[in-house]
């Protein structure tokens, strides 16, 4: 929801109409990546703090330092905060801005995938490993080779292959990598290096992970999102084009790639037939929430599907102090996801 409209919000009325409440209120949490491990729901969020950084269009005010893992035995169950699972001071290569993470499991080990800025101010994606889903996680000494930008989401396909989807424009720096290397010109501009409005929008990236989940097996490639005519979405189509917050799930043998449109504040999705795409834009999952950012994950638990998302209602609109929430989603008979209005109970 745009900043300027927040002044006019009556938060009591809004909270009464909200389709869900914050899962925890003792800390601020955002960017929830949810998975079911050992029959329990685990949520891997960002841990929002007020570090005193001024608001800017590069997201400098998102100055998070660590991760906490949340878990619950069922939807609406008691939510446990397992405490600090990884701190930036314990990541040799990372300096700051522990942004949206994800996690996955393989052979009884748990892997936390996270973006952070290195000491050159460049976002990279790291991995940290634990024997338990709640951590604590031990970080690898270096970021993933060939990784860049933000918002990793790691999807395990039915054949046991793991793919990482990632990327984010503006402060997420994806536009700086258009030539295959980091473009350091105009560092203060969120929009320098973006395509023109009539050109295809920048694509999220996908790469297969190595067997040990610590590296890519291949160079990350573009994940195409097409319109109803089979044409790539354009950069100027900012109600539909990819901005950040990649997620992948599979429903009835179809692949669903979902993401945030950033400056228009929607969570959208596109459908495809294989994990590399192409994907066809298919609609909106979530209308704008209170706060500038929108970020989500989708996870099945006991035959029902849930959207995990965040808003800034608990902090009464403070952009970088968000709270994770969850709500059930429904599919229609064509496999389309029914759009949720977050404040229309
Ligand atoms: O939480 C920091 C950033 O804000 C995330 O990486 C983006 O997806 C947005 O939610």
Image (spheres, rainbow, N blue to C red):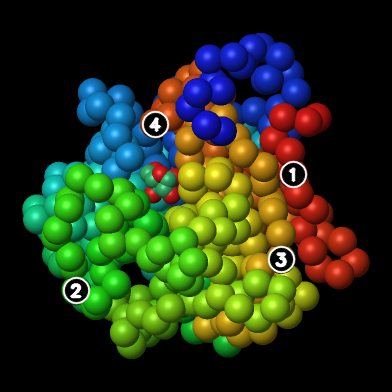
Q: Is mark 4 within 8 Å of ligand 1?
A: yes
Residue located at (30% from left, 29% from top)? 55
- Secondary structure type for disc 2: loop
- Would you name the residue on which mark 2 appears? 181
For the residue pair 155 and 286, the one nearer the viewer reads as 286
Question: In the figure, residue 111 lies in which quadrant?
Answer: bottom left
Q: CA distance from mark 1 to mark 3?
A: 14 Å
- Would you name the residue on which mark 1 appears? 340
Which-is-in-front pick, marks 1 and 3? 3
Q: Position of residue 86 (x, y in %)?
A: 28, 47
Pointer 1 or 2: first along the chain:
2
Pointer 3 or 4: first along the chain:
3
- Secondary structure type for disc 4: loop
Residue 138 in the image: above or below residue 266: below
Disc 3 crowd, CA 10 A, few/some/many (<14, 14-19, 20+) = many
- Secondary structure type for disc 3: strand
């Amino acid at each position: 929801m745009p900043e300027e409209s927040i002044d006019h919000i009556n938060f009591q009325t809004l909270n009464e109409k909200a389709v869900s409440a914050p899962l925890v209120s003792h800390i601020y949490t955002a960017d929830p990546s949810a998975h079911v491990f050992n029959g329990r729901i685990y949520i891997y969020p960002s841990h929002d703090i007020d570090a005193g950084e001024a608001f800017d269009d590069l997201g400098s005010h998102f100055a998070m330092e660590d991760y906490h893992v949340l878990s619950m035995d069922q939807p609406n169950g008691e939510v446990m905060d397992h405490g600090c699972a990884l701190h930036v001071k314990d990541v040799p290569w990372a300096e700051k801005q522990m942004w949206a993470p994800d996690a996955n499991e393989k052979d009884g080990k748990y892997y936390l995938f996270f973006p952070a800025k290195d000491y050159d101010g460049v976002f990279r994606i790291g991995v940290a490993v634990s024997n338990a889903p709640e951590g604590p996680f031990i970080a690898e000494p270096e970021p993933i080779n060939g990784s860049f930008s933000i918002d990793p989401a790691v999807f395990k396909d039915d054949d046991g292959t793991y793919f990482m989807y990632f990327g984010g424009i503006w402060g997420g720096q994806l536009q700086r990598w258009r030539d295959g290397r980091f473009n350091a010109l105009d560092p203060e501009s969120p929009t320098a290096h973006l395509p023109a409005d009539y050109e295809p929008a920048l694509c999220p990236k996908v790469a297969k992970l190595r067997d040990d989940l610590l590296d890519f097996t291949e160079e990350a490639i573009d994940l195409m999102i097409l319109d109803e005519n089979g044409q790539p979405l354009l950069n100027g189509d900012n109600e539909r084009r990819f901005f950040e917050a990649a997620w992948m799930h599979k429903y009835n043998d179809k692949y669903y790639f979902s993401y945030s449109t950033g400056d228009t504040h929607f969570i959208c999705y596109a459908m495809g037939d294989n994990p590399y795409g192409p994907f066809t834009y298919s609609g909106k999952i979530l209308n704008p929430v209170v706060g500038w950012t929108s970020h989500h994950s989708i996870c099945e638990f006991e035959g029902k599907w849930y959207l995990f998302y965040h808003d800034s209602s608990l902090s009464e609109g403070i952009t970088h102090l968000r709270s994770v929430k969850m709500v059930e989603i429904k599919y229609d008979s064509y496999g389309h996801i029914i759009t949720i209005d977050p404040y229309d109970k």
